[in-house]
């Protein structure tokens, strides 16, 4: 199985880029992992909110294959413990799907089209994090999930 994280806009802060790169490189030992940053829309500030979400949604959907399992990272999603998330990952790998795609939307969330395509909603916390930081937290949790599945000592 391939796992893909698709995000809107590039990560600006160097410390976040370094952290993301660290965990993405670690994940390569466990799974085919791809991190995709879709460039921010041009003139986004001039767009109506619904149009901005529609266009960002179309960009996100263009990175999804028909047979993929799609998970949106959303504050209204299901929360897991780290061991519970590792079981979720294992269940998806056992399902026979070729690709598991996680989506991080723009600052205003997802379009209705993205929600309709999603198979699952996942919340990282009841707290709100910046869209930049969510990426680092998420790739660390995917790495942690694989160390749990392998019985390694990273997760105590």
Image (spheres, rainbow, N blue to C red):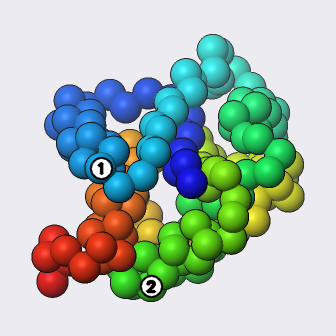
Q: Residue at x 56, y 35 (%)?
A: 8
Q: Residue at x 64, y 51 (%)?
A: 99
Disc 2 residue crowd, few under 14, some 14–19, many 20+, Cα 10 Å: few
Q: Residue 88: x and y, percent?
A: 54, 77
Disc 1 residue crowd, few under 14, some 14–19, many 20+, Cα 10 Å: few
* Side of 154 relative to 87 (left or right): left
Q: Residue 146: x and y, percent?
A: 35, 67
Q: Where does the C terminus fall, quadrant-wise?
A: bottom left
Alpha-carbon distance for marks 2 and 1?
21 Å
* Residue 11 found in image quarter: top left
Q: Of tags 2 and 1, which is closer to the observer?
A: 1
Decide: marks 2, 1 in contact (CB < 8 A)?
A: no
Q: Residue at x 43, y 64 (%)?
A: 128
The kind of secondary structure element at disc 1 is: loop
Q: Residue 40: x and y, percent?
A: 56, 24
Residue of label 2 = 84
Residue 57 seen in render: no
Q: Where does the N terminus fall, quadrant-wise?
A: bottom right
* Residue 33 found in image quarter: top left
Is 48 located above or below residue 83 in the figure? above
The kind of secondary structure element at disc 2 is: helix
Closer to the camera in the image, 51 or 26: 26
Q: Residue furthest top?
A: 42
Upstream in sequence: badge 2 or badge 1: 1
* Side of 38 relative to 130 (left or right): right
Residue of label 1 = 29
Is 15 located above or below residue 94 in the figure? above
* Residue 63 found in image quarter: top right
């Amino acid at each position: 199985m391939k796992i893909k994280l698709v995000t809107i806009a590039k990560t600006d802060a160097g410390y976040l880029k370094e952290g993301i790169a660290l965990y993405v490189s670690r994940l390569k030992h466990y799974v085919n992992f791809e991190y995709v940053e879709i460039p921010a829309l041009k003139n986004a500030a001039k767009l109506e909110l619904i149009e901005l979400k529609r266009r960002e949604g179309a960009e996100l959907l263009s990175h999804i294959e028909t047979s993929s399992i799609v998970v949106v990272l959303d504050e209204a999603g299901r929360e897991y413990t780290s061991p519970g998330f590792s079981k979720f990952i294992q269940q998806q790998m056992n399902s026979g799907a070729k690709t598991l795609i996680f989506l991080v939307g723009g600052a205003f969330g997802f379009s209705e089209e993205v929600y309709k395509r999603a198979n699952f909603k996942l919340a990282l916390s009841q707290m709100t994090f910046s869209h930049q930081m969510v990426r680092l937290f998420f790739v660390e949790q995917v790495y942690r999930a694989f160390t749990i599945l392998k019985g390694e000592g990273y997760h105590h």
